[in-house]
Image: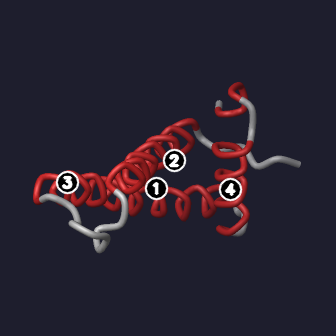
């Protein structure tokens, strides 16, 4: 039986994943900060801002997972696993 997840939690995880993808994209675009020449101050600032934005989105998602697990009487790890499965590994219609 699948765990019923509230839409706000699914949306929050989608948002956090999109923010993390931005951090990864900047890292891929800029290369290693310790490579020859390194990053410019502008590149470092852009990456730092993206990283901080992503990190600030993770805590509320984790808190909401804990709340939902308690509400449903399910183990927290199962709620988190189902959320990530649904958001990251399912088809486009599985998010709701």
| Residue located beneath label 3 in the image | 43
Where residue 29 appears, as percent x and y from the top left, is 37, 49
Label 1 with label 2: CB-CB less than 8 Å = yes
Labels 1 and 4: the sequence-earlier one: 1
x 51%, y 47%: residue: 13
Label 2 with label 3: CB-CB less than 8 Å = no
How much space separates mark 3 and mark 1, taking CA atoms?
28 Å
How much space separates mark 1 and mark 4, taking CA atoms?
16 Å
* Residue 81 falls in image quadrant: bottom right
Crowd around label 4: few <14 · some 14–19 · many ≥20 (10 Å):
few
User: Which numbered marker is on residue 13?
Assistant: 2
Examine the rendered structure and indicate whether residue 7 appears above or below residue 24: above
Give the mark toward the camera: 3 or 1. Answer: 3
Labels 4 and 3: the sequence-earlier one: 3
| Residue located beneath label 1 in the image | 61
Label 3 with label 1: CB-CB less than 8 Å = no
Would residue 87 be found to the left or right of residue 1 on screen?
left
How much space separates mark 4 and mark 3, taking CA atoms?
44 Å
Labels 4 and 2: the sequence-earlier one: 2
How much space separates mark 4 and mark 2, taking CA atoms?
18 Å
Examine the rendered structure and indicate whether residue 12 appears above or below residue 20: above
Labels 3 and 1: the sequence-earlier one: 3
Would residue 86 be found to the left or right of residue 43 on screen?
right
Given residues 26 and 50, the one toward you in this image is 26
Crowd around label 3: few <14 · some 14–19 · many ≥20 (10 Å):
some
How much space separates mark 2 and mark 3, taking CA atoms?
26 Å
Labels 1 and 2: the sequence-earlier one: 2
* Residue 47 falls in image quadrant: bottom left
x 65%, y 46%: residue: 88
């Amino acid at each position: 039986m699948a765990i019923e997840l509230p839409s706000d939690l699914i949306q929050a995880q989608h948002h956090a994943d999109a923010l993390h993808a931005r951090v990864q994209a900047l890292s891929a675009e800029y290369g290693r900060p310790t490579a020859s020449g390194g990053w410019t101050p502008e590149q470092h600032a852009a990456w730092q801002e993206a990283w901080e934005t992503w990190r600030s989105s993770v805590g509320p998602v984790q808190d909401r997972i804990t709340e939902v697990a308690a509400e449903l009487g399910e183990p927290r790890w199962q709620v988190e696993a189902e959320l990530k499965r649904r958001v990251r590994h399912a088809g486009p219609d599985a998010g709701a």
